[in-house]
Image: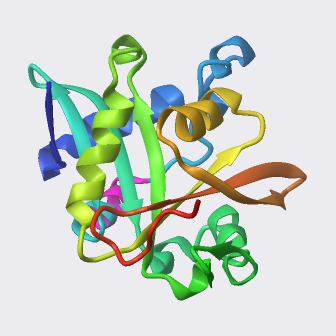
């Protein structure tokens, strides 16, 4: 398994895995194993890849999973993410408001159904943290309340801190934060 920064030729496979796991394309039973709340266009994925970055897991040339990261500015145009950003002034993390930190938005992350259960989430997460070392101190994620599989994977599996919640279009979302390797923030006790 190769874990690396995404290349332009990875974008079509990312779009395919994204579509196969978007909440609107899944039956209720399929959603129990996790889902994506937002679907990005090719252009938006290319912008993320050029900005903070996208990391991929490639298994013998086949995309096994991906993890995107983007700036606050990139996310302001998406209503669900703009609502997340509005919460940052009121959330304390490491003694400062989230808004005061050098931070990036983590996600979406998706593991192809055929590649789940192999530790890829942790591998993608650690690869991303290395990619952003020195540029950011904190990563912030959000997870839909109706996606307990993803919430457990990020809190119990990766050790992210649940730092807040917000409601958007009548749906509850959990706000998670984590320190970046070598960043100025030390993980709160």
At x 44%, y 69%, the residue is 186
Magenta residue check for 133: no
Q: Is residue 26 above or below residue 55?
A: above
User: Picture quarter containing residue 167?
Assistant: bottom right
Q: Nearer the viewer, residue 137 or 42?
A: 137
* Quadrant the N terminus occupies: top left
In the rendered view, does 107 fall on the left or right side of 27?
left
The image quadrant of residue 16 is top left
Q: Decide if residue 30 is on the left or right side of residue 178.
A: right
Give the quadrant of residue 34: top right
Up the image or down, 176 lies above or below 50; here it is: above
Report x, y in % for residue 37.
62, 44
Q: Residue 72, position in %: x, y?
A: 50, 77
Q: In the image, which residues are magenta?
A: 41-47
- Residue 46 in magenta? yes
* Residue that extends furthest to the right in the rendered view of this protein: 170
Q: Is residue 30 left or right of residue 74?
A: right
For image coordinates 62% across by 31% down, the residue present is 152
The C terminus lies in which quarter of the figure? bottom right
Residue visible at 77% across and 40% down in the picture: 145
Give the farthest residue toward the bottom.
Answer: 100
Q: Looking at the picture, does residue 38 appear above or below residue 33? A: below
């Amino acid at each position: 398994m190769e874990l690396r920064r995404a290349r332009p030729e990875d974008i079509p496979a990312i779009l395919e895995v994204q579509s196969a796991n978007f909440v609107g394309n899944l039956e209720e039973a399929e959603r129990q194993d996790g889902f994506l709340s937002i679907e990005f266009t090719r252009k938006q994925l290319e912008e993320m890849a050029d900005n903070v970055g996208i990391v991929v897991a490639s298994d013998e040339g086949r995309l096994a999973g991906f993890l995107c990261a983007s700036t606050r500015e990139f996310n302001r145009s998406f209503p669900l993410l703009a609502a997340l950003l509005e919460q940052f002034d009121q959330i304390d993390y490491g003694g400062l408001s989230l808004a005061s930190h050098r931070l990036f938005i983590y996600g979406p992350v998706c593991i192809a159904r055929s590649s789940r259960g192999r530790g890829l989430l942790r591998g993608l997460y650690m690869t991303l943290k290395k990619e952003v070392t020195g540029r950011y101190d904190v990563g912030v994620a959000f997870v839909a309340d109706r996606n307990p599989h993803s919430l457990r994977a990020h809190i119990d599996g990766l050790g992210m801190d649940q730092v807040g919640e917000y409601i958007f279009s009548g749906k509850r979302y959990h706000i998670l934060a984590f320190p970046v390797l070598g960043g100025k923030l030390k993980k709160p006790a």
